[in-house]
Image (tube, grey):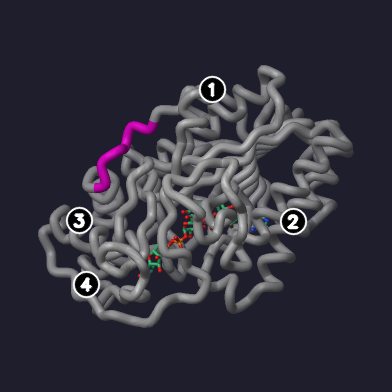
Amino acid sequence: MAILVTGGAGYIGSHTVAALLERGEEVVVLDNLQTGHREALLGGKLYEGDLRDKEILTKLFAENSIDAVIHFAANSLVGESMKEPAKYYDNNVFGTLCLLEAMNAANVRRIVFSSTAATYGEPEKVPIEESDRTEPTNVYGETKLMMERMMSWFDKVQDIKYVSLRYFNAAGAHESGKIGEDHQPESHLIPLVLQTALKQRSHIAVFGDDYATEDGTCVRDYIHVSDLADAHLRAVDYLRKGENSNVFNLGNGTGFSVKQVIETAKKVTGLDIPVVQEPRRAGDPAVLVASSAKARSVLGWNPKWTNLEDVIQSAWNWHQSRPEGYGKN
Ligand SMILES: NC(=O)c1ccc[n+]([C@@H]2O[C@H](COP(=O)([O-])OP(=O)(O)OC[C@H]3O[C@@H](n4cnc5c(N)ncnc54)[C@H](O)[C@@H]3O)[C@@H](O)[C@H]2O)c1
Ligand SMILES: O=c1ccn([C@@H]2O[C@H](COP(=O)(O)OP(=O)(O)O[C@H]3O[C@H](CO)[C@@H](O)[C@H](O)[C@H]3O)[C@@H](O)[C@H]2O)c(=O)[nH]1
């Protein structure tokens, strides 16, 4: 039996594919390569196509014995979602609907889903627990919450069991140095800061310094991509044991401000990183920090990369060895 990974050629998807292959799983990937890279796939069978294309989904499920789906494929940028909402409802919500319909038709009843800290919006308290209020402050988070609710109804009505993993901020790169983060254009803080250290950019913009945080900049919980990959394998095992649908936060439980990330990157690289203060970015909550106690106790998840310096060092190794990323697909 194979595992279908949608978005497997993307950043977190490719690290999860690597982890699945390492433990001997058969992997099938569906990716339209809109942000992913063929070279990021260290194995598995790639179907190059779109989640919203019913024909390719039907073909893929007919040609492979799929046991479970891990669903990464989505648009996932907070800032962009506040400029182009339709793109997010279409790819994320409609795309997931197409996938669930095809799964039901093919009698595939397990899905692990990439959700996000952005489902919470401004948290009522930190660290955030899964039972806390979900009131997204951006379109992206709203679409992910809709996808979770949709899966909950497909569970009730069609018995498709799901595990929704609400990741906080993914960071770092694979220890082998073969795969890492390469988004074109890049919008995530850590890669942008490291590209500035490499002098590929003149400066890093800090979006807002008037938040209610210690130094006025936004606080996030950075979690290593290999720890995220490990959680997906545990979530598949959890569903294979016949457990009920569930939701888990995945974070380290420590928050770092934008300024602290830049300072840590300066220390790791030993290089100058010029900063320019800019206005707030629409849709950004001030603080997002996870309680992952539930994932630890139920999934036995135990993140290894708990130190921000080590996480940034692992990203730095990747950026130094592949300053242009993967290059052309
Ligand atoms: N990066 C983070 O910090 C973070 C945090 C929380 C949640 N997430 C979620 O994790 C998932 C992966 O994030 P990422 O950072 O690896 O993003 P990514 O853009 O690197 O990966 C997404 C992959 O999905 C593919 N894709 C997108 N739409 C598709 C479609 N319609 N059909 C087929 N393939 C499609 C892309 O080509 C890409 O390979 C996303 O669902 C995102 O919302 C990411
Ligand atoms: O040039 C930049 C880029 C980012 N930031 C700030 O840095 C923080 C982190 O931003 P970014 O790296 O863009 O991540 P988020 O917007 O927090 O979103 C990421 O983390 C979410 C979970 O918390 C995921 O759901 C999203 O998919 C993923 O992109 C935010 O406060 C941004 O305002 C800057 O100040 N300057």
Q: Is residue 26 above or below residue 152?
A: above
* Residue at the image point whose x is 70% and y is 47% from the top: 148
Tell which circle, 3 or 1, labels the residue nearer the N-terminal end: 1
Mark 3 CB near ligand 2 (8 Å cut) = no
Query: Residue at label 4?
Result: 199
Instruction: State how far apart marks 1 and 2 are (Cα).
Output: 29 Å
* Helix, strand or loop for the magenta stretch, by majority: loop
Q: Mark 4, residues whose alpha carbon is within 10 Å: few (<14), some, or many (≥20)?
A: some
Q: Quadrant of the N terminus?
A: top right
Q: CA distance from mark 3 to mark 1?
A: 37 Å
Which residue is pictured at 74% across the width and 48% down the height?
A: 149
Give the mark, 2 or 4, whose residue is nearer the N terminus.
2
Pointer 3 residue: 264
- Give the crowd class for mark 2: few <14, some 14-19, many >=20 residues within 10 Å: many
Q: Measure the C-alpha gap from mark 2 to mark 3.
A: 38 Å
Tags 1 and 2 touching, CB below 8 Å? no
Residue matched to label 1: 24
Q: Would residue 307 be counted in the magenta stretch? A: yes
Q: Amino acid at mark 3?
A: Thr
**Percent position of residue 126, x then y:** 43, 49
Label 2 CB less than 8 angstroms from ligand 1: yes
Residues at marks 2 and 4, CA–CA distance in whole angstroms: 38 Å
